[in-house]
Image (cartoon, helix red, strand yellow):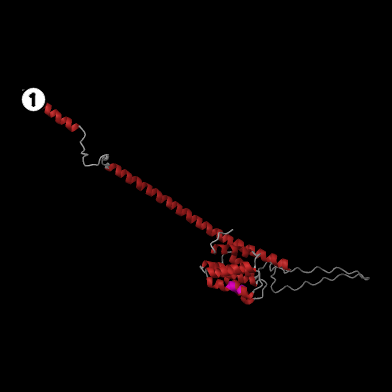
Amino acid sequence: MKKLPALLLFASSFALADSLAPVIDNSNYPIGVTPQAPIPASSTMNSTFEMMTRLDEAQAEIQQLNGKLEEQANLIAELKKKQSAMYADFDERLQQIENKASGAKPATEVEPAAKPAEPMPTPAPTAPKPVAAPAASATTPATGSQTPYQQAFEAFRNGQVAEAIAQFSDLLSKDPNNQLANNAQFWLGEAYRVNKDIPSAKKAFSAVLEKYPNSQKVPDALLKLGSIEMDAKNSVKAKELFTRVITDYPTSKPAEVAAKKLQQLNGTPAQ
């Protein structure tokens, strides 16, 4: 009977030992270093899931940015088209102003008929005779019509580049002495450049210098040739052309642009 309390005491000691936390042997760790408890598997899975969620969000943001970049690219392309049209229209208006300043009548105007002559005071009252209107010039269009230059220019301004090239070329071939032939030669080069036909563009711009050396389009043609060489990474030739614009036409608008491009080539910030 005395053995029963001893057995009960022994069994209760085992139950107490099982309820206590397991003993960790720290003898193999350096002094001052506390071993870390193992990370539960559920915590690792949560971290992985969180990283995947953030990755998905980042990819979504990148797609949105790509869409915005594409929209910006389209907007820039539209602005370039509008800028080209505005530049072309400005050139046309400038040419009309130049013609008026030099005393020449613009191609868009029709020379008006002369007014009837006023009667001269004579002893005998005679009725005045009207003076016949002068014959229209060969280059003067009829009212409501367009000259070949205007048709070609309008085609280019409307983005019909191939048609503009054909019409400018036809004008220069049939009427090389036209008062707007220098402009037609310049815009032919510009149309080739827009059409990515760089060799033909260079040839057309060079023809402005050779055939119309006194034309006001010469500095513009030099600037275009310099820009073509700059785009082709021919820095030496580009600098030569830009310097020529600045030296020979220092007060022109192309000279201002040439100066900025020359600063870019020299690595100097544009003013």
- When the figure is inspected, residue 231 is found, relative to residue 67, above or below; the finding is below
Q: Which residue is mark 1?
A: 4
- Residue in front for this viewpoint, 134 or 195: 195
Taking the image as shown, residue 153 lies to the left or right of residue 199, namely: right
Number of other residues with Cα within 10 Å of mark 1, as a class: few under 14, some 14 to 19, many 20 or more: few
When asked about the image quadrant of residue 37, the answer is: top left
**Which residue is farthest right?**
123
Quadrant containing the C terminus is bottom right
Residue 135: percent from left, percent from top: 75, 74
> Which residue occupies the extreme left position in the image?
1
Instruction: Return the x and y of residue 183 as percentages of the image width and height.
Output: 63, 70
* Front one among 245 and 105: 245
Residue depicted at x 51% and y 58%: 74
Look at the image and tell me whether residue 190 can be seen.
Answer: no
Q: Residue at x 27, y 43 (%)?
A: 41
What is the total number of numbered labels drawn onto the structure image? 1
Q: Is residue 118 magenta?
A: no
Residue sitting at 36 percent across and 46 percent down?
53
Does residue 2 lie above or below 76 as drawn?
A: above
Give coordinates of residue 45: x percent, y percent: 30, 44
Q: Determine the main secondary structure of the stretch shown in magenta.
A: helix
Drawn side of residue 124 relative to residue 146, left or right: right
- Which residues make up the magenta segment? 204-208
Question: Foreground residue, 155 or 224?
Answer: 224
Residue furthest front in the image:
31
* Secondary structure found at label 1: helix
Classify residue 93 by image quadrant.
bottom right
> Image quadrant for the N terminus?
top left
Q: Amino acid at mark 1?
A: Leu
From the top left corner, tell me how far across and down residue 186 is, in percent: 61, 70
